[in-house]
Amino acid sequence: KGKRAFIAGIADDNGYGWAIAKSLAAAGAEILVGTWVPALNIFETSLRRGKFDESRILPDGSLMEITKVYPLDAVFDSLEDVPEDIKANKRYAGSSKWTVSEVAESVKEDFGSIDILVHSLANGPEVTKPLLETSRKGYLAAISASSYSYVSLLKHFLPIMNPGGSSISLTYIASERIIPGYGGGMSSAKAALESDTRVLAFEAGRKKKVRVNTISAGPLRSRAAKAIGFIDMMIEYSIANAPLQKELSADEVGNTAAFLASPLASAITGAVLYVDNGLNAMGVGI
Ligand code: NAI
């Protein structure tokens, strides 16, 4: 029987979430997607109009099918948490059941269970500000959208995850090494995400035999990364300094996620796996 994956954090065909969906689809998984509410309309329209058809092509020539797209805002756990201004916002009012608990409930109603959970989302409103200039509000927002969103997703999806299932998130080395420019508390948020990966691996492993890992990915020119502003510099830096002097392709991260979700990785849990052409292993740029 094929596996079913829920991938949170796809709104176009440029990010890691899309590449992970493709690798999982190529390996035979059924794909469900969670898309940020404000981005839902344009994503679904583009999908329907065939704008992504070229990037939907799988290695066997067929097109990746997305069985269902769910609206999702991962900073809200249930309807009671949603402030009035968001409820009244036109983009949000047009959709319903997009808090984390409601999405998990909808997936349960529609499909019963999943095998693979992917968290490929992050948001830090003050990411362009140095940590010393970051407000409490901005810092907490980064942690809420980029770290707790994962705790919440796993918490609400774990009850419908089949034993032997696998959960994956995306992190960045700014959690453990100084990357000037990755500000606003985003470095802190990734540190929390990596620490939580270990604790959640223990809890989900004992509770449901579910594995929990995170991929520390190298730089990719995604929509989110372009918003930070230094992505081209980071890509050039990596090509100049990493052991493997090539641009990282999103597919290489997608394939690693497919490996981690497969029985080939049945003893891997609680891990931070680098998929960065080896840049993390360098001590100095050379
Ligand atoms: P992306 O822009 O493709 O993905 C980020 C997604 O998060 C977007 O689809 C956005 O709509 C969604 N999102 C933001 N706030 C949300 C919320 N409250 N609820 C639901 N969805 C929300 O960009 P990318 O870069 O592929 O990001 C995916 C993951 O990869 C992130 O965790 C990012 O930190 C991580 N990463 C990215 C690197 C890069 O160089 N692009 C390097 C290392 C890690």
Image: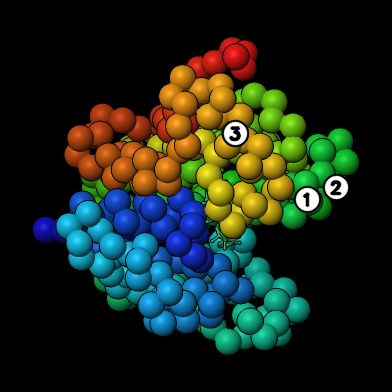
Q: What residue is shown with label 3?
A: 236
> Which numbered disc, 1 or 3, marks the residue that appears first in the sequence?
1
Q: State yes or no: discs 1 and 2 in contact (Cβ < 8 Å).
A: yes
User: In the rendered view, does 212 fall on the left or right side of 80?
Assistant: left
> Which numbered disc, 1 or 2, marks the residue that appears first in the sequence?
1
Q: Classify mark 2: residues with Cα within 10 Å, few (<14), some (14-19) or many (20+).
A: some
* Quadrant where the C terminus is found in the figure: top right
The answer as to whether callout 2 falls within 8 Å of ligand 1 is no
Q: Secondary structure at mark 2?
A: loop
Q: Classify mark 3: residues with Cα within 10 Å, few (<14), some (14-19) or many (20+).
A: some
Q: Secondary structure at mark 3?
A: helix
When the figure is inspected, residue 66 is found, relative to residue 276, above or below; the finding is below
Q: What residue is shown with label 1?
A: 126
Q: Amino acid at mark 1?
A: Glu
**Going 56% across and 29% down the picture, which residue do you hit?**
238
**Going 46% across and 77% down the picture, which residue do you hit?**
46
* Quadrant where the N terminus is found in the figure: bottom left
User: In the rendered view, does 39 fall on the left or right side of 268?
Assistant: right
Cα–Cα span, label 1 and label 2? 8 Å
Q: State yes or no: discs 1 and 3 in contact (Cβ < 8 Å).
A: no
Q: Residue furthest right?
A: 133
Tag in front: 2 or 3: 3
Q: Amino acid at mark 3?
A: Glu
Q: Nearer the viewer, residue 259 or 89?
A: 259
**Going 37% across and 51% down the picture, which residue do you hit?**
20
Q: What residue is shown with label 2?
A: 135
Q: Amino acid at mark 2?
A: Ser
* Number of numbered callouts drawn: 3
